Image (tube, rainbow, N blue to C red):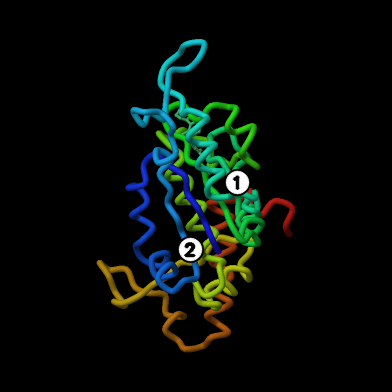
Amino acid sequence: MKITILTLFPEMFTALSASILGRAQKEGKLELTIVNIRDYTEDKHLKCDDYPFGGGAGMVMMAQPVGSAIEAVDPDHTARRIYLSPKGATFTQQKVFELVGQEHLVLLCGHYEGVDQRAIDLFIDEEVSIGDYVLTGGELPAMVVVDCVARYVDGVLSPESLVQESFSENLLEYPQYTRPVEYRGLRVPDVLRSGNHAEIDKWRREQSVAVTKKQRPDLLEGKS
Ligand code: 4H6
């Protein structure tokens, strides 16, 4: 899968070279391209932002560099073009499954007060928000989208981790334990060391339901 990120702050995306996403890129399963919008400005001083018409605080990203960058990375408009913005529809796991089916995603990161509306109207397919809070830029939301989607690209995660997840759909995860057997007086539940896999599965299912009831009862609404 191909994901192109358009940003004025490409250095923020070094985080995506670590861990599982770093390996996925090295193995050629995920092709991530970080594009500096500034490379596309036609301004002689390389400016990419300007004061808002009508006044008000902050700066607005100019339509020209954003539009030219999008046209350069997706000239035939075959990609799904997404603008990360607090006004977008909330990003959910359902949206993740919708996006993994795409061959190419283009993620536009706004900064300052956002992007000139004309660039959104002309070049963007949809606006997505990762939740009801305000950030300084769309860069962190873009990384969230990349991480969520990349998990479902073939060969990025082990098939077992994904099967596990689909079994426990709409339930929170059961608690996990590793060595040592006792830490500060707290012991690993005996059943997990019993070797009885039917009992382990049963305990884990019960724990998943109990923790969901306690912490996210909304997920169980309309069930049982
Ligand atoms: C586009 C438009 C996404 C991007 C406006 C972006 C939260 C999310 C931004 C803005 C974001 C999210 C600039 C508007 C700062 C508010 C960057 N914040 N903002 N929830 N900020 O996905 O002022």
| Quarter assignment of residue 136 | top left
Does the residue tagged 2 have its C-beta within 8 Å of any atom of ligand 1?
no
Image: 155 above or below 129: below
Of helix, strand and loop, which one carries label 2?
strand
Q: Quadrant of residue 202?
A: bottom right
Which residue position is annotated with label 2?
31
Question: Taking 55 as reference, is 155 above or below it?
Answer: below
Q: Who's the residue at 53% across and 51% down the image?
A: 215
Q: Nearer the viewer, residue 20 or 172?
A: 20
Q: Nearer the viewer, residue 162 or 1?
A: 1
From mark 1 to mark 2, how far is it between C-alphas? 16 Å
The residue wearing badge 1 is 81
Provide residue 71's location: percent of width, then percent of height. 56, 44
| Disc 1 and disc 2 in contact, CB within 8 angstroms | no
Three-letter amino acid code at the position of disc 1? Arg
The residue positioned farthest toward the bottom in the image shown: 195
